[in-house]
Amino acid sequence: MKKGIVVIILFIALIVGFVGGYFSYPFVQGFQEGYAEVIEQANQALVKANMKTFNIVVECYKIDSGFYPKNSDISWAREELPPNFKNPYTKAKGEAYVSGKPTKLGVIGYESNDEGTEYVIYGYGVDWVLITPETHGEFNKVPINVDWE
């Protein structure tokens, strides 16, 4: 007699578990989507923070040398950037910045004119943002075409 009651209780618990799982799935799915959105916003904020850090390094370079670094050689950045400077999406340190416009998500791009008097720092996130000497300290969402004349 006791075996029958135990089997019935287990069967009822199994049914309640399946019904509870069925109705809780949308809540779990919504949590996962919300978590992914929070992670994406955090990565975008890290791209902007990397841009600002790169901007400060470029401005310090100008103070030391009298001109902005030429974009043909950005090896100077390896020594000047902090050791934890990395791509927030891939977590790789070697692919956090490039010369010119970046083509990968999370990468910072640096471009200057030949005289070293103007520069643009690109941030490749969901939207293009950039920093120029005129907008030092601000982020602008603008088209990525830059004419040096």
Image (cartoon, rainbow, N blue to C red):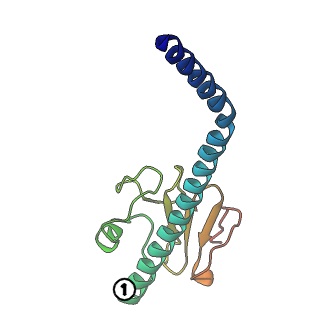
Q: How crowded is mark 1: few (under 14 residues within 10 Å), some or many (20 or more)?
A: few
Residue at 47% in and 14% down: 2
Question: Which residue is pictured at 65% across the width and 34% down the height?
Answer: 25
Rendered view: 2 above or below 44:
above
For residue 12, above or below residue 101? above
Res 68 seen here: no
Q: What quarter of the picture does the C terminus occupy?
A: bottom right
- 82, above or below 108, in the image: below
In the depicted view, which residue is nearer to us: 112 or 45? Answer: 45
> Visible in this render: residue 133?
yes
Q: Position of residue 102 (x, y in %)?
A: 52, 55
State the residue position of label 1: 65
In this orientation, which residue lies closer to the viewer: 90 or 123?
Answer: 90
**Amino acid type at mark 1:** Ser
In the rendering, at what x and y percent does residue 89 appear? 48, 52
Residue drawn at (40%, 84%) of the image: 60
Q: Which of 42 and 19 is in front in this view?
A: 19
User: Where does the image place residue 36, in percent across and percent down from the top left?
Assistant: 58, 48
In the figure, residue 118 lies in which quadrant? Answer: bottom right
Which type of secondary structure does the marked residue at label 1 adopt? Answer: helix
